Amino acid sequence: MIARMRVLFAMVCLVALAPAAAFAQCAPAPDSAYFFRNLSEQRAQARIDGDRKVYESQLSDTFTSRDAGGRPLSRDAFIDAELNGEHPSHDRSFSISNYTLVEHRKGHTVATYTLREDTTIAGQPRVQELQLTEVYEVVGSKWRLTAVETRPAAPALQSPQADL
């Protein structure tokens, strides 16, 4: 009798813990801001690593873009601009903040965020902040980046007390 109760108790515990374990292992759903932020972070890291394959796998064939100066860029020109002139040997890092899904409906998402890149070249630190707006669409059953608009981030407002 006691052995049967132990087995029953163990089964009840396993049943109770199974949904929690399954939830902990799930990746963010494609309708989650975390899913799209992860794609943006993958490209930011690929820029640092000089990994063209990440860009080629995420960008649609009809991808279009505008750089920070407002000039239109094709898919290949965008990838070249992202990877050109940067040397992986420099100390580089990135951070993404204010990630927001501006629009999200079936098969279409618009996200915006601030990308901060910190680079140290020959001991000289350089910081660049950009505001990105990205458009994702489902192409062939996979989310693809179809458009990016990049512009300089607005300078942060300083409180009057900061000058005291």
Image: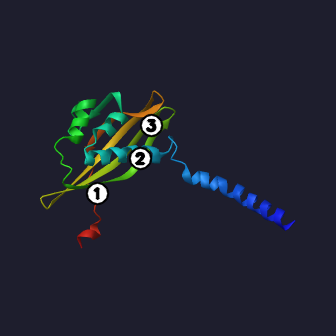
Q: Position of residue 55 (x, y in %)?
A: 32, 37
Q: Position of residue 102 (x, y in %)?
A: 43, 42
The CA distance from mark 3 to mark 2 is 14 Å
Whether residue 46 is visible = yes
**In front here: 164 or 9?**
9
Residue 125 is left or right of residue 64, and the answer is left
Residue 1 is left or right of residue 11, and the answer is right
Residue at 36%, 44% (x, y): give it. 40
Q: Residue furthest right?
A: 1
- The residue where tag 1 is placed is 156
Q: Position of residue 24 (x, y in %)?
A: 56, 54
Badge 2: few (under 14), some or many (20 or more) residues near its Cα, within 10 Å? Answer: few
Q: Which mark is residue 109?
A: 3
Mark found first going from the N terminus, 3 or 1: 3
Q: Which mark is residue 38?
A: 2
Badge 1: few (under 14), some or many (20 or more) residues near its Cα, within 10 Å? Answer: few
Whether residue 152 is visible = no
Image quadrant where residue 3 sits = bottom right
Mark found first going from the N terminus, 3 or 2: 2
